[in-house]
């Protein structure tokens, strides 16, 4: 018998239950929308809120529980909106507050929750406080809301310490009057000084503004960066950690950040409707990530250790085990994520040899990458906890690795030595239709050029095609929803498996993933629910090809 993601019989025809569920976020599948690149309603080549609103039914039908929107606030766009100039306004390129309200209303009617991005580590250099701080000169009380310092050296010509920007180059920029200010990211993103009470007051007010608007939660940008070690000490040595590393740095993961989140949690809990916080916290270990999701702090934190794991059964098993062990004591759900707007898409990461990290310049073997990406998705969706999907991964989109330099916008690219700066490749606008201008993204062009053949990966081209990646995601999300408790719980029961294979049981459900380069034979575990590739079964044994995941049930 040969099986290709054979569908289950999903009980409810609508994949979404619109009635509120208790603790909905513990096993939620959350879809990241990158507003610039999702859907463009006015044909200016830039995605917008109205475009997103028009595509909400697609997301409802895909079967996700919630949508996380990357920033859409007023911004000069020095870092694609992660440089906010007005936290309470929508950038005109994306629409206005009425559009945000309409989006929230429609989402609610469709049973989708909306999580917005909050950027508290830094503002734009065009934020009013910073503009005035610079204009008012040394001694201005507004400078205390950021990290202004005199320089070192005879004439203050050297930066105040040896920290480097995550995007490359020094983390300090000098203003005309000779003082320097700190920016862990681009110079247009000055870091707030969270020791100053006005900063906390401002963000508590911003939280309330969006909570009053009706958002279901916040993704906290650089959640691990708000508090800096007293005295801003030098790091010493040249091996400065960028995002994931083994050491706690004086600008990341300082214990003081937790007090901020305890305060925020009390605000959130005043509001009805189980709203949540999710932390973007790059910490050295999952155990330290768990500190962010203690019962009186945030609800979830992204699992970047999982995202950074190679396609290797042993390594995957280790990170899954460690994550579950780390989250259990604090009672928070584990989270799982394979792609986002900052890393090379996993279909391309897995197309390349291991050891290249999460910023990759080469297309690699695309068929291999897609096969592994599909298998990785079924593995991720079989794990207890909450899973994140980045827009376009349900189409199996690869990274666009050959964008010409003149269209690139990622500040990290221009600052060279930083994190490699290839983030534009995962931000190319979504193809919705086979043909047409910008493949249905909008009526005009697209802010980053879409490659030839993009239409063959479109929603239109894949809809209703049984073997397509889109249909695999749709079926997988339906199964996850209809299988009893697939996302619930905090443990898996590991099964003995050959080298290169990962196998676990969760009640009547069994997931087997073969990451090895060879087919393997495993026992049949009941009825096949879904597979990411073709398997064969005979005499109680299943032949699972390389880079394939199988879901079985004994029910
Ligand atoms: C993390 C965001 O995901 C990334 O896109 C941004 O550049 C940095 N934080 C700075 O805000």
Image (tube, rainbow, N blue to C red):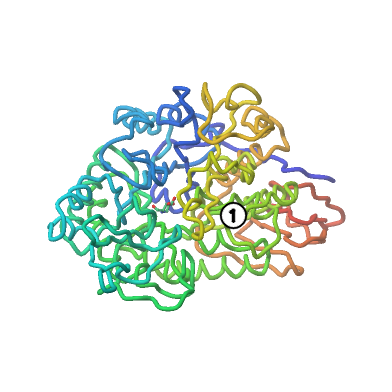
In the displayed structure, would residue 280 be above or below residue 131? below
Counting from the top left corner in percent of width and height, residue 309 is at 60, 63
| Circle 1: element type | helix
Foreground residue, 83 or 73? 83
In the displayed structure, would residue 235 be above or below residue 528? below
Q: Is residue 243 left or right of residue 259?
A: right
Counting from the top left corner in percent of width and height, residue 109 is at 39, 30
Q: Residue at x 41, y 67 (%)?
A: 290
Label 1 Cα neighbours within 10 Å, binned few <14 / some 14-19 / many ≥20:
many
Residue 210 visible: yes
Q: Residue at x 65, y 65 (%)?
A: 355
In the displayed structure, would residue 223 be above or below residue 241? above
Name the image quarter holding residue 544.
bottom right
In the displayed structure, would residue 481 be above or below residue 166? above
State the count of labels.
1
Counting from the top left corner in percent of width and height, residue 267 is at 22, 52
Q: Is residue 201 left or right of residue 249?
A: left
Q: Residue at x 51, y 60 (%)?
A: 417
Foreground residue, 119 or 139? 139
Residue highlighted by disc 1: 380
């Amino acid at each position: 018998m040969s099986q290709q993601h054979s569908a289950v019989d999903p009980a409810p025809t609508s994949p979404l239950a619109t009635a509120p569920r208790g603790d909905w976020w513990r096993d939620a599948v959350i879809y990241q929308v990158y507003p610039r690149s999702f859907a463009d309603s006015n044909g200016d080549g830039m995605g917008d809120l109205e475009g997103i609103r028009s595509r909400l039914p697609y997301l409802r039908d895909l079967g996700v529980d919630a949508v996380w929107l990357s920033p859409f606030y007023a911004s000069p766009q020095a870092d694609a909106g992660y440089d906010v100039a007005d936290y309470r306004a929508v950038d005109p390129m994306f629409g206005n507050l009425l559009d945000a309200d309409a989006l929230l209303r429609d989402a609610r009617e469709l049973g989708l929750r909306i999580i917005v991005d909050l950027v508290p580590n830094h503002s734009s250099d065009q934020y009013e406080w910073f503009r005035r701080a610079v204009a008012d000169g040394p001694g201005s009380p507004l400078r205390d809301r950021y990290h202004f310092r005199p320089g070192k050296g005879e004439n203050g010509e050297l930066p105040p310490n040896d920290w480097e920007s995550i995007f490359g180059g020094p983390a300090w920029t000098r203003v005309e009057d000779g003082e320097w200010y700190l920016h862990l990211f681009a110079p247009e993103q000055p870091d707030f000084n969270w020791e100053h009470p006005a900063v906390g007051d401002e963000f508590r007010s911003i939280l309330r503004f969006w909570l009053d608007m009706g958002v279901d939660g916040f993704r906290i940008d650089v959640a691990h960066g708000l508090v800096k070690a007293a005295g801003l000490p030098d790091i010493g040595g040249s091996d400065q950690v960028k995002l994931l590393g083994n050491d706690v740095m004086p600008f990341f993961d300082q214990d003081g950040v937790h007090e901020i989140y305890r305060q925020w949690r009390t605000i959130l809990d005043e509001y009805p409707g189980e709203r949540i916080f999710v932390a973007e916290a790059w910490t050295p270990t999952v155990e330290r990530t768990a500190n962010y999701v203690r019962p009186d702090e945030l609800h979830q934190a992204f699992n970047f250790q999982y995202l950074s794991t190679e396609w290797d059964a042993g390594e995957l098993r280790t990170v899954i085990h460690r994550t579950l062990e780390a989250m259990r004591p604090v009672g928070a759900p584990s989270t799982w994520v394979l792609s986002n707007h900052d890393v090379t898409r996993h279909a391309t990461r897995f197309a390349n040899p291991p050891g290249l990290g999460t910023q990759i310049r080469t297309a690699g073997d695309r068929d291999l990458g897609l096969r592994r990406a599909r298998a990785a998705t079924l593995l991720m969706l079989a794990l207890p906890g909450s899973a994140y999907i980045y827009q376009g991964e349900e189409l199996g989109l690869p990274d666009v690795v050959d964008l010409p330099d003149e269209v690139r916008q990622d500040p990290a690219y221009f600052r060279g030595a930083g994190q490699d700066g290839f983030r534009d490749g995962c931000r190319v606008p979504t193809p919705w239709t086979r043909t047409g201008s910008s493949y249905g993204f909008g009526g005009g062009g697209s802010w980053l050029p879409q490659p030839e053949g993009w239409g063959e990966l479109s929603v239109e081209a894949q809809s209703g095609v049984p073997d397509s990646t889109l249909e695999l995601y749709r079926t997988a999300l339906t199964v996850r929803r209809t299988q009893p408790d697939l996302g619930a719980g905090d443990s898996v029961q590991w099964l003995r498996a050959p080298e290169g294979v990962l196998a676990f049981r969760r009640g009547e459900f069994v997931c087997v993933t073969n990451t090895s380069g060879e087919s393997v034979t495993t026992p049949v575990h009941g009825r096949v629910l879904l597979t990411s590739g073709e398997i064969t079964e005979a005499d109680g044994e299943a032949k699972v090809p390389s880079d394939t995941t199988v879901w079985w049930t004994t029910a």
